[in-house]
Image: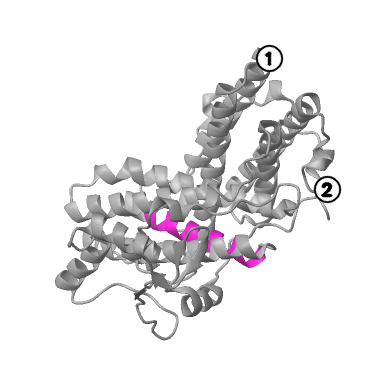
Amino acid sequence: MPFNPLEHRGIPMDRQLRTWRELDVPPIDPDHCDPYTRCRIIAMNGIEMEAVWFSHHMARHCPDMDVKRQLAATRAIESQQQKAVNWLLPGVSSVLETTLAYEQVAVDLTAWVARMEPDPYLKQAYQFGVLEDFDHLYRYANLYEMIEHRKAEEVVQGLTEVMPGRPTKFHHRDPVDNVREPYDRTQAAPLSKLHALTIMAAEQQTMNFYCNVGPEYMEPIARQLYQEIGLIEEEHVTHYESLVDPGETWWEQLVNHEYNECYLYHSFMRQEPDPKVKAIWELHLNMELEHLRIACDLLRRHDGREPEQVCAPELPDALTFEPNKGYVRELLDAQMDLTTLGAGYVREAHERFEAMQAKLNNGDQPPSERVIDQHRDMLGGEYRVESEGEHPVPSLRVR
């Protein structure tokens, strides 16, 4: 049945604050959970972190004390939601196991969004990015086996392939070539706005995660690989955040954020097999419905518009975590050798790309290449899991 979050009232704000006991949620069992349950947790943690930080930034630009107080009240609940979601991850999982799950999120979430995106330019932006996250999964899988002597397959459980994508060494581009053209807020489909927010938030959280956990390793190659891929995640945040129309007002952006949270909690609630986790998705959906109502009231009061002028009249089809092996393989065949030039895409290693590579590498192999070399030296080959066939490792055409 169609679900229009604008027509539903959620839990009143004065009943949303949770006690310490209520926030102390039991974590999932990493050895027996559905891998996509873990992916949904990681994705929603990123969404909640984006909601909190957007609210902070809006408050820093808002002179109205009443609005700042309302943002603070909602933000306190969003922060509790973020803690409840993120604390579903088990402490028994290593940082590298969680890293593999982060990259599984990046691959299958971005691939699904690319498949469903109606705008061809935005679709290309997601297709381009997914091949880079796909390669990050492969690099971390090799590191995981070297350090922990376990297979990445135990984490992704066959839902996502582990093999080379666009080589990570080719992800380092001149910053000006990471900026995309934004969608037009007056013309873009509501689904396109939700997609852009979702992928931006997921990549932003991945960037922050790598920035924080990378220095915790003693092994030099691990520290170096997290540093390299963490820098690429910053490029990805630039890539995706630039898709959002900067002409959207603060009030419009606030409504879009809250609507997107309703969309994702509703989507995940419908597909979640773990009853304890599903109950959290349902609870948070009912909280977000009230946050959306408050944001819509602020839009009316300060922007002079109705939420129906900004949001879709009903939620789109549920965002779904599912295998995307065939789709990713099609992209591997067609787009492995792409890089960016301005706001477009080319197959040539152009002057700015070559200059960036020369400055950054200074004649050395980057960590993403050395981790494969070290894996070969230690274990006699590289780690990869493929359903079928082999794919060549591409190189950009040098002029």
Q: Residues within 10 Å of mark 2 (few under 14, many from 20)?
A: some
Residue 208 placement: quadrant: top left
Q: Position of residue 333 (x, y in %)?
A: 48, 80
**Circle 1 sits on which residue?**
66
Q: Quadrant of the C terminus?
A: bottom left
Q: Whole-Å distance between the Cαs marked 1 and 2?
A: 29 Å
Residue depicted at 41% across the width and 48% down the height: 234
Does dot 1 land on a helix, a strand or a loop? helix
Applied colour scheme: one colour
Point out the tag, 1 or 2, that comes first from the N-terminus.
1
Q: Position of residue 258 (x, y in %)?
A: 68, 38
- Figure label count: 2
Residue 384 placement: quadrant: bottom left
Q: Does 2 appear above or below 369?
A: above
Return the residue found at the far top: 65
Q: Residues within 10 Å of mark 1 (few under 14, many from 20)?
A: few
User: Is 314 on the left or on the right of 113, as rendered?
Assistant: right
Numbered label attached to residue 313 = 2
Front residue of 157 and 43: 43
Magenta stretch, residue numbers = 99-116
Residue depicted at 57% across the width and 65% down the height: 124
Q: Position of residue 304 (x, y in %)?
A: 82, 29
Is residue 30 in view from this perspective? no
Q: Amino acid at mark 1?
A: Asp
> Could you tell me what secondary structure mostly forms the magenta stretch?
helix
